[in-house]
Image: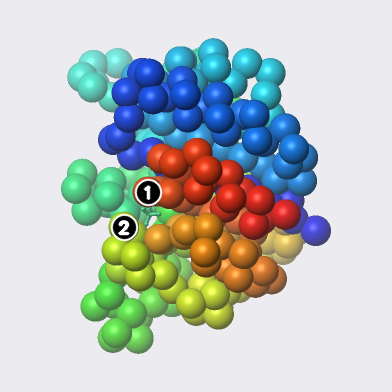
């Protein structure tokens, strides 16, 4: 049985004050949810504040991305090692906004996943098709390609620490979600792709769904056998909504 994981990706939202309030509210509620792994990805500058507020509460801290190089003259970049040093235990890599707005390619994302693992972080590799790709019947080919490059780059033992997030691009921030069965179909397909290389890791692999998850649709989504939790954008900025989504994963 895979343990559910629900993570909030705040993207570029919030302030120091709001970080502290939101994190404190989540921590309070999460103590009553021992069955779920709950994570938060604040903007980099608030990671330390968030970590201080979390204290010993069972909330995992994550980065929204990391650099594809270890260290050096890379102005503006944050390395996986720095995230681990600041208290993170996971990092998102390959979010569709990074792919489209920052030109990240599959090979860059594989490198980031590898560096994250070397720094002791779990990489949450984000994959997903555009609406054009779905309508052209290319969903599986697209996500398989995105995942394949990462899977080929990693060792068997590293694959056991991988998390995948399936986020159809057309569902991100649009209010339009994949149906639970559409999501499950892609999740099962992704699990199969990992199984070809690492059957044991595939069975334990957590695959999260992301894209307009709200308290109203979360329970149906999480009830699907291959949906192991969610990556939540907009709704994670509201403590009550985010907590209700975490509860739906129990
Ligand atoms: P929304 O939940 O706002 O659609 O965002 C999803 C997402 O991109 C999480 O990484």
Does label 2 point to a residue whose CB lies under 8 Å from ligand 1? yes
Q: Which residue is mark 2?
A: 173
Between 98 and 36, which is closer to the camera in this rendering? Answer: 36
Count of marks placed on residues: 2
112 versus 168 height, above or below: above
Residue 188 sits above or below residue 123 on the image: below
Quick one: SS at disc 1? helix
Q: CA distance from mark 2 to mark 1?
A: 7 Å
- Neighbour class for label 1 at 10 Å: few (<14), some, many (≥20)? many
Please, what secondary structure does the residue beneath circle 2 have?
loop
Residue 127 percent across, percent down from the top left:
41, 59
What is the x, y in percent for residue 169? 32, 64
Tell me where residue 33 appears, x and y as whole percent: 73, 41
Looking at the image, can residue 198 be seen? Answer: no
Question: Residue at left 45%, top 34%?
Answer: 41
Residue 82 visible, this orientation: yes
Identify which residue is drawn at 65% across, 35% down: 29
Q: Are marks 2 and 1 in contact (CB under 8 Å)?
A: yes
Question: Residue furthest toward the front?
Answer: 240
Q: Position of residue 195 (x, y in %)?
A: 66, 66
Q: Is residue 23 above or below residue 204?
A: above
Task: Look at the image and tell me in which quarter the N terminus lies.
Answer: bottom right
Q: In the image, what residue occupies the spot 41% across and 70% down?
A: 177
Query: Which residue is at 56% across, 37% downward?
Result: 39
Left/right placement of residue 128 relative to residue 122 reads left
For label 1, being within 8 Å of ligand 1 is answered yes
Q: Earlier in the sequence, mark 2 or mark 1?
A: 2
Residue marked by disc 1: 234
Q: Quadrant of residue 132?
A: bottom left
Residue 51 versus residue 163: which sits nearer the camera?
51
């Amino acid at each position: 049985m895979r343990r559910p994981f629900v993570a909030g990706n705040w993207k570029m939202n919030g302030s120091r004050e709001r970080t502290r309030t939101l994190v404190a509210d989540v921590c309070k509620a999460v103590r009553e949810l021992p069955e779920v792994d709950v994570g938060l990805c604040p903007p980099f500058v608030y990671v330390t504040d968030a970590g201080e507020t979390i204290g010993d509460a069972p909330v995992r801290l994550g980065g929204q991305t990391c650099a594809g190089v270890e260290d050096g003259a890379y102005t503006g970049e944050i390395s996986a090692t720095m995230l681990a040093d600041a208290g993170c235990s996971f990092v998102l890599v390959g979010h569709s906004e990074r792919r489209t707005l920052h030109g990240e390619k599959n090979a860059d994302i594989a490198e980031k996943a590898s560096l994250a693992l070397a720094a002791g972080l779990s990489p949450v590799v984000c994959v997903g098709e555009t609406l054009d790709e779905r309508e052209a019947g290319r969903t599986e080919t697209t996500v398989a390609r995105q995942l394949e490059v990462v899977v080929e780059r990693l060792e068997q033992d590293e694959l056991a620490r991988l998390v995948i997030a399936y986020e159809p691009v057309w569902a991100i921030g649009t209010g339009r979600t994949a149906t639970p069965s559409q999501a499950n179909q892609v999740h099962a397909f992704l699990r199969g792709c990992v199984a070809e290389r690492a059957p044991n890791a595939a069975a334990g692999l957590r695959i999260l769904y992301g894209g307009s998850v709200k308290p109203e649709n979360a329970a149906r989504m999480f009830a699907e056998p291959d949906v192991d939790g969610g990556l939540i954008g907009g709704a994670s900025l509201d403590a009550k909504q985010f907590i209700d989504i975490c509860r739906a994963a129990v």
